[in-house]
Amino acid sequence: MKYAFSERGVKEFSCTSASTDMSIQCDTEKAGRLLLLQKEKTEADNIIQLISAANLILEGFPLVKNPPNSGFELPSDEVDRESIFENVFRRNGFFQQFTHRETLPVAVAIAAIAWPDKKLVYAIHKLARSYETESVTPWSMHPCYKEMFQKHTENFSSHVDTSVAINLAYSAVEELGLTVQASAKRPRSVGQGTFKWNPVVLLPFQERLQNAGTASERTIDWITRGRQTEVNIYKTLDNPSDYSDGVDVRDRRINIPDAINFCEYLRNFMTAHAFSTDTTRLGPYEVYNVQQIARLLILSKCDLWNTGTDDLRNSFG
């Protein structure tokens, strides 16, 4: 009884006393619905937590504090059940815990698709925890804002958060099996001076990406802002985005294999082991870039990249 939906939008009541107004609904309005799961409590809680993690990934930033992480048992006895609705669900405290986000239908779809694949489930949770550790709002990356955030900090604790966030996001990519599979005998690059993919490594890598729903030729923007104070490896990214000005906005356009390879470099040489002097040069933009790669791969794996609620209605009837 907290939400009323119509074609014109959604009404939300923040106080239980206001819920009585829900009985006066227009013909075009529908009351909110509970998510009902006929499962044992542990399994139900796992599903709810997965939906919450999937929704965080969709929004790309933890906008909801303390999202639902457990279910509430409904007894089979009708009188007992009605008492719960009357005395618990409409009571202050519990009433405020009910949540609605526009992205929730897609989050439920992600959870349903991912549920049989525990690797994908862990990937979703790892990326969600990465966002919770450190993240910036996606819209703040628009080129009109230029360098909106301080690129580096002298704060030691922040260095740890940045590294943990990068490690978790990259580990999500690992769960999907979409990292570069190279070795001393099968090096990822050939030649000297500039990076050039070894076909023996690249071709099966591209095939794995294709099988996971991501075309290897797809490109993304690698966000690079402000003064050129990032690590020297950035110089290998030499294809500016269309809107790059070469000064305040120096974003690069790179394909997915190169982006994953670059994420792996950050993780292997700057965040996963003992810190080096270069680690302190990482910041919110590197975190965002690695998270965006993991996000694209997860949503593509679920076949829900660029999918909205209208698309779901068409797909699931």
Image: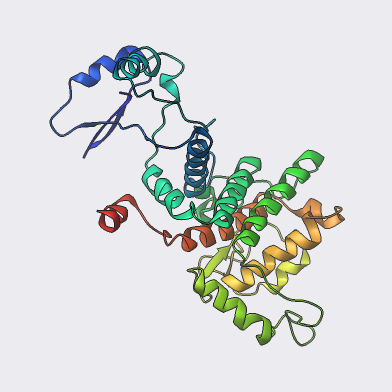
Q: Residue at x 39, y 25 (%)?
A: 74
Tell how many labels. 0
Coloring scheme used: rainbow
Residue 89 drawn above or below residue 190:
above
Q: Nearer the viewer, residue 204 or 254?
A: 204
Query: Is residue 220 or residue 131 the one in the foreground?
Result: 131
Residue 191: where, in percent of width, then height? Answer: 77, 88
Report the side of 22 relative to 185 (left or right): left
On screen, residue 138 above or below 223? above
Tell me what residue is drawn at x 62 percent, y 59 percent.
175
42 or 29: which is nearer to us? 42
Q: Is 28 displayed left or right of 306 in the figure? A: left
Percent x, y of residue 42: 54, 36
Which quadrant does the N terminus fall into? top left
Q: Quadrant of residue 104?
A: top left
Query: Could you tell me residue 149's position as x and y percent?
Result: 64, 46
Whether residue 91 is visible: yes
Give the farthest residue toward the front. 77
Which residue: 55% across, 51% down?
121
Question: Where's residue 198, x and y in %?
Answer: 70, 85
